[in-house]
Image (cartoon, rainbow, N blue to C red):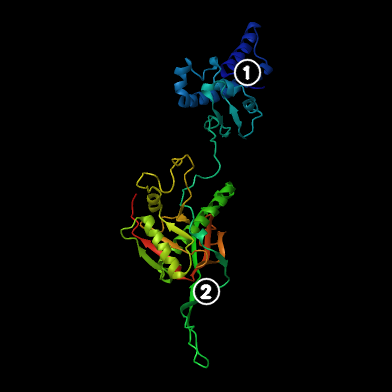
């Protein structure tokens, strides 16, 4: 017997069977007794389900009673309870005789009004005396793909350096320390003047930069994009530390690269000059001492902002108007100074800039690049269903001509 009515209607049908037997002045037949028992079973099942849905509705939709002017879960108003018990999903499990021991109706749409736009899943239950099925309606969230990431400053210094591969743990190069040119005109048969060269060997150790993270393998299994996200973040963390060490690394004592500022490069304080003028003087001095023209400037964003806002005595912006010049032509927005590209980095430190011939006087040697590996064989990770992921890179910084780089200080520390 299919379930298509509410509990009250099934009880009324059972009473009608009794009434027909009474009107005929006879007892109930075996078939009528079976019909009545079936109707009462259905009425009891319907009563339990309707009561649970009404209770849930009162918890979730109490304000709707005031807004709709009636109980939204009342059978007389065609509320969610009515729509649930009349759904095809519920009819499939409504008959106690054919309903399995474990069951689930699946998602059931219970709303016909914009005021009750809810969809839920009735939790599966166990058919046993005195217990109802299911715990309630579970809302399904909309999941936005991807992860909202914490932002870090863009990598800029590493892009200035040429890169080469190495398959050794040490990069060795010859450095000419002194070169005395004694060439001169000589008389026939006279002793020729001797020039001298002072050459030394420099070894740069290949240093490792690494980091790890531990995640559950369920997380990796349930969301494939999570592994791609973690891999990219680990690689970024390694690259950020690599850029810091290229500038400020202290050397072997900390298992770090020896950065530019840790070497015997030129130093220049701008004194009373404006930052723009002071940096120009440092460019000229560097070109004169190293016979190499600087190719880029690494500067703190605060210091570059001060230079970018510089104005002439007439009020015109030296780097171009923010919107357009006084003649209507576009302003200049490239990050550059005195014709050199500016790489913005907070690692260089406010008040300090680094300029030099990055393209020819230094090189970054990389052994293998950034690699990411994962394993569950460390410690007790296997028994805990955890995965350890590791990112690492090995590199060495060679500065062939320290005199081609200058640390410029005295630029100020605030806007």
x, y (%) of residue 186? 50, 88
- Residue drawn at (39%, 51%) of the image: 307
| Mark 1 residue crowding within 10 angstroms, few (<14) / some (14–19) / many (20+) | many
x, y (%) of residue 298? 44, 58
Between residue 99 and residue 146, name the one nearer to us.
Answer: 146
Q: Which residue is mark 1?
A: 36
- Give above or below for 276 relative to 267: above
Between residue 58 and residue 363, name the one nearer to us.
Answer: 363
Quadrant containing the N terminus is top right
Q: Image check: 34 left or right of 388?
A: right
Q: Which residue is mark 2?
A: 170
Question: Can you see residue 259?
Answer: no
Quadrant in the rendering for residue 142? top right
**Which of label 2 and label 1 is nearer to you?**
2
- Residue drawn at (33%, 54%) of the image: 413
Between residue 366 and residue 287, name the one nearer to us.
Answer: 287
Question: Can you see residue 73?
Answer: yes
Q: Image check: 253 left or right of 174?
A: left
- Give above or below for 75 relative to 107: above
Q: SS for tag 1?
A: helix
Give the mark, 2 or 1, whose residue is nearer the N terminus.
1
């Amino acid at each position: 017997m299919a379930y298509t009515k509410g509990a009250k209607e099934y009880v009324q049908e059972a009473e009608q069977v009794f009434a027909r037997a009474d009107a005929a002045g006879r007892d109930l037949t075996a078939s009528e007794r079976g019909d009545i028992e079936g109707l009462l079973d259905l009425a009891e099942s319907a009563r339990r389900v309707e009561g649970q849905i009404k209770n849930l509705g009162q918890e979730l939709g109490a304000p709707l009673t005031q807004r709709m002017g009636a109980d939204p879960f009342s059978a007389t108003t065609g509320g969610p309870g009515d729509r649930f018990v009349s759904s095809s999903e519920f009819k499939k499990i409504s008959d106690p005789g054919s309903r399995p021991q474990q069951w689930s109706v699946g998602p059931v749409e219970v709303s016909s009004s914009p005021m009750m736009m809810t969809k839920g899943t009735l939790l599966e239950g166990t058919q046993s005396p005195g217990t109802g099925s299911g715990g309630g309606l579970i809302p399904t969230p909309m999941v936005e793909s991807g992860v909202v990431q914490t932002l870090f400053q863009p990598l800029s210094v590493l892009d200035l350096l040429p890169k080469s591969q190495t398959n050794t743990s040490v990069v060795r190069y010859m450095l000419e320390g002194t070169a005395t040119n004694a060439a001169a005109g000589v008389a026939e048969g006279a002793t020729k003047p001797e020039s001298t060269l002072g050459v030394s060997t420099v070894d740069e150790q290949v240093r490792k930069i690494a980091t790890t993270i531990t995640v559950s393998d369920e997380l990796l299994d349930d969301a494939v994009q999570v592994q791609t996200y973690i891999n990219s973040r680990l690689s970024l963390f390694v690259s950020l530390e690599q850029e810091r060490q290229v500038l400020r690394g202290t050397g072997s004592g900390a298992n770090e690269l020896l950065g530019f500022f840790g070497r015997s490069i030129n130093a220049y304080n701008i004194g009373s000059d404006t930052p723009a003028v002071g940096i120009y003087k440092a460019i000229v001095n560097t070109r004169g001492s190293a016979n190499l023209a600087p190719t880029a400037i690494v500067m703190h964003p605060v210091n570059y902002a001060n230079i970018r806002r510089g104005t002439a005595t007439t009020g015109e912006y030296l780097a171009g108007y923010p919107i357009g010049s006084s003649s209507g032509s576009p302003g200049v927005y490239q990050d550059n100074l005195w014709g050199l590209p500016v790489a913005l980095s907070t690692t260089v430190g406010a008040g300090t800039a680094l300029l030099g011939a990055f393209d020819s006087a230094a090189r970054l040697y990389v052994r293998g690049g950034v690699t990411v590996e994962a394993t569950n064989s460390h410690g007790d990770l296997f028994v805990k269903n955890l995965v350890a992921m590791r990112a690492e890179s090995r590199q060495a910084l060679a500065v062939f001509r320290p005199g081609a780089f200058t640390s410029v200080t005295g630029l100020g520390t605030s806007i």
